[in-house]
């Protein structure tokens, strides 16, 4: 009996349902969003049962904002794919092919959530926005973990060649130029999914002891730390600055800022029950 000593890449990334084409990347994103909203609602309602459903209402604005922000960040940080000599502007709208930058998604998504939350606060008594962010942080991490499996289905964003049992099999047609002779690569989608899930579990366990805002800051800080190193493994085309990928610089900068914010909030006395 021959044992497969590597991780296979799915042979399909979409399927047909009548006249519709269902992309598995999109399904992973949708599933992640659903988990994030469900868990966020559950955690926020634990603060006060009257808050049930608030996360869902805020998500109506926050989720589209996050998707737009994620796409904008990807396009801006990878301009050659769309504006270069062989670029195609139409591809900007093909989100199902992959390409949602997490930093843009967090930034614009949080901004959309803030304005939606403030609007809702005019009619309903709500705790601070920091309490809201803390409630949704673990769910966002699980959403990111699930979303990374979309990269697995798309056979994209994998790392350097890796010859071991957890190496990811990549078909010849999907290998970058210069890597055609290598068959297995670092499964960076799995690294990030595991890292994000681990952070989420730790935040659920320990975040309840921290002051408002600290849990969300810890999420951003810890994710950035892991993303810096995972990004260094990837071999997909990327803009470089000083020998590092742009996303590494962004991760390092956000790690420093988020860590400082976490330390500031962590020292505060807890002002809201969890």
Image (cartoon, rainbow, N blue to C red):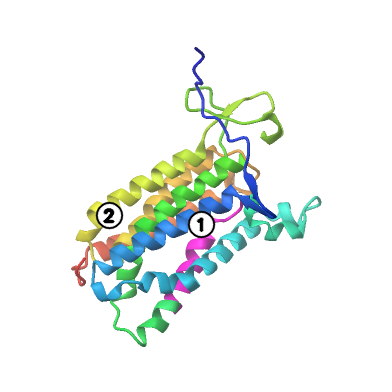
Quadrant in the rendering for residue 173: top right
In the picture, measured across the screen, residue 141 lies left or right of residue 100, that is: left
Question: For mark 2, what is the residue?
Answer: 204
Helix, strand or loop for disc 2 = helix
Residues at marks 1 and 2, CA–CA distance in whole angstroms: 22 Å
Residue 183 position, x and y percent, is: 62, 25
The quadrant where residue 184 appears: top right
Q: Residue furthest bottom?
A: 122
| In the displayed structure image, the side of residue 154 where residue 122 appears, left or right | left
118 horizontally vs 84: left or right: left
Is disc 1 surrounded by few (<14), some (14 to 19) or many (20+) residues within 10 Å?
Answer: some
Q: Which residue is mark 1?
A: 30
Q: Are the two marked residues, 1 and 2, in contact with CB atoms closer than 8 angstroms?
A: no
Compared to 244, does 260 lie above or below? below
**Callout 2 crowding tier (Cα within 10 Å): few <14, some 14–19, many ≥20:** some
Q: How many marks?
A: 2
Of residues 238 and 63, which is closer to you in this image? Answer: 63
Residue range of the region highlighted in magenta in the rendering: 98-115
- Where's residue 16, x and y in %? 66, 48
Residue at 43 percent across and 51 percent down: it is: 224
Q: Position of residue 236 (x, y in %)?
A: 63, 41
Residue at point 30% right, 79% down?
126
Can the viewer see residue 163 in this picture? yes
Q: Nearer the viewer, residue 255 or 56?
A: 56
- Where the C terminus falls, by quadrant? bottom left
Name the N-terminal-most of marks 1 and 2: 1
> Looking at the image, which residue sits at the far top?
1
Q: Residue at x 51, y 68 (%)?
A: 108
């Amino acid at each position: 009996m021959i044992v497969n000593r590597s991780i296979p890449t799915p042979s399909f990334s979409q399927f047909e349902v009548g006249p519709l084409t269902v992309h598995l990347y999109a399904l992973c994103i949708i599933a992640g969003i659903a988990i994030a909203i469900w868990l966020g609602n559950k955690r926020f309602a634990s603060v006060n049962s009257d808050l049930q459903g608030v996360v869902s209402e805020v998500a109506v604005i926050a989720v589209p904002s996050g998707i737009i922000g994620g796409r904008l960040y990807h396009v801006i940080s990878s301009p050659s794919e769309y504006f270069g000599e062989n670029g195609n502007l139409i591809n900007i709208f093909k989100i199902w092919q992959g390409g949602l930058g997490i930093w843009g998604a967090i930034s614009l998504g949080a901004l959309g959530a803030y304005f939606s939350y403030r609007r809702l606060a005019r009619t309903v008594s709500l705790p601070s926005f920091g309490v809201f962010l803390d409630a949704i942080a673990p769910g966002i991490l699980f959403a990111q973990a699930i979303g990374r499996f979309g990269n697995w289905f798309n056979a994209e964003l994998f790392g350097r060649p890796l010859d071991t049992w957890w190496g990811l099999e990549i078909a010849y047609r999907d290998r970058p130029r210069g890597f055609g002779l290598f068959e297995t690569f670092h499964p960076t989608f799995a690294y990030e999914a595991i890292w994000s899930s681990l952070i989420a579990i730790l935040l659920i366990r320990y975040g309840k002891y921290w002051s408002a805002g600290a849990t969300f800051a810890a999420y951003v800080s810890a994710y950035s730390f892991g993303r810096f190193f995972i990004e260094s493994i990837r071999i997909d085309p990327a803009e470089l600055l000083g020998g590092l990928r742009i996303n590494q610089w962004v991760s390092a900068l956000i790690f420093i800022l988020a860590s400082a914010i976490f330390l500031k909030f962590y020292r505060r006395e807890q002002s809201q029950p969890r």
